[in-house]
Image: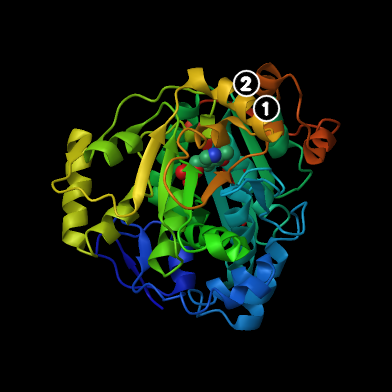
Amino acid sequence: MKYVSTRGQSKKLTFSEAVSEGLAPDGGLYVPEIMPDISGKIRDWEKLDYAGVCFEFLRLFADDIPDEDLRSIVNASYTKFDVPQIAPLKKLESGLYLLELFHGPTLAFKDFALQFLGNLYEYLLSKSSRKINVLGATSGDTGSAAINGLLGKKNVNIFILYPEGRISPLQERQMTCTGADNVFPVAIDGTFDDAQAIVKELFGDNAFKSKWNLSAVNSINLARILAQCVYYVYAWTRLPEPERSNPTFIVPTGNFGNILAGWMAWKMGMPAAGFRVATNQNDILYRLFKTGIYEVSAVKPSYAPSMDIQVASNFERFIYFAEKGDSAKVREIMAGFKANGKWVFDNFKAEGFSASKMDDSEIPQKIKEVYEKYSEVIDPHTACAFKDLSGSGAKVVVSTAHPAKFPALIEKAVGVSPKAESLEILKSKKIVKKLMRASARDVREYIEANAIR
Ligand SMILES: *Cc1c(COP(=O)(O)O)cnc(C)c1O
């Protein structure tokens, strides 16, 4: 299997190459050249456990990695989850299910891809005798999941910048209490945008970037999307037979990576009625799927902060597939959107997607309603997915974070304070972080002093 850029102006790569590259040199995102057909296989996968399904699925894509190596990478990636099912599918009532994706080490769905990516990086580095330094900025979940995925891995150090005092205390502990000596959390005296700007500036300096083998672990990486396809397929194999023909997956959405993965599994032959994009009040994708107009507006901070995104980076992959692989058209759309902050699609087709939106004013009420009806405490991101359960066939609501990550809001909404053992343990650990001014120069010096080479 080869991987091509959505913009069509980079050369085709193998799986390992595309994973190491991240963003394509032409600015596009890597996609499989052809979509394999899994429709004849997935019924047999119901006999397998999560890691088994994951291996069978990923070997269709990672065909430049020997099977026995891929199997051990996959097996190692799902050992830090706290339930044997890894991604339990819980029945709430007839035809309504909750797919719990928060049983990983940092209690959000990003662990599914970043645990795998961490092990994959370690494997690829061991083959090439290269060493890399991962650099990123985070407003919360991604940084902690990336750190946990790379924790203690050989040949890689990780530097994550975050805005001091502007992420939740628990999120900060997830990044700063690891005790690992290849992890360097940097608290920036500034905003998330300041941290992001420093990262961009350092990546923009080619000499610095190549000297230290700087690498990113952002949500556009091919391996992240493919690892996320797996839990949709796994959930499908766990649905009762009569409900397998047309389930609708409802997914709390920000950067469009999670839901796109489910939609790709559908394109490969997993039966489904459709995929519902559930946004918070940052509703660019909701507006797109209602009107065919993709237009940015200002980010409004919300109770579901991991979805406080306007430009959804994975959306470009959808455009590529919707335009049937016409990369000239993708370039035209992306350039037009970049220039004007807006693109009006003519004859827009939703291609299996529908959308809903939930304002902050509704989120605590929805958490309470779900608690009273099903005795389930859901987190504020998952709450957004309960907005619209309409349509025929089974509904699978994708639950993206553990409620214990948001204790104050949950306590206010339902009067109970959810707990998670891994977060309780963190509370007694020592915080190790470097506080720095919002200065690219200072951060550069810090990296130079601590980078692996
Ligand atoms: C990252 C995240 C999302 C958004 O997922 P995308 O793949 O960016 O659409 C939703 N909920 C939680 C809890 C997250 O951490």
Which of the two residues, 157 or 410, is positioned nearer the viewer here?
A: 410
Q: Nearer the viewer, mark 1 or mark 2?
A: 1
**Residue 252 seen in the figure:** yes
Residue at screen point 58% across, 43% down: 400
**Mark 1 within 8 Å of ligand 1, using the beta carbon:** no
Mark 1, Cα crowd under 10 Å, few <14 / some 14-19 / many 20+, is few
**What amino acid is at disc 2?**
Gly
Which of the two residues, 109 or 11, is positioned nearer the viewer here?
A: 109
Element under disc 2 = loop
**What amino acid is at disc 1?**
Glu
Q: Is residue 392 left or right of residue 345?
A: right
Element under disc 1 = helix
Q: Mark 2 highlights which residue? A: 165
In the figure, 104 relative to 122: above or below? above
Q: Mark 1 highlights which residue? A: 372
Tell me residue 200's x, y (percent). Answer: 41, 40
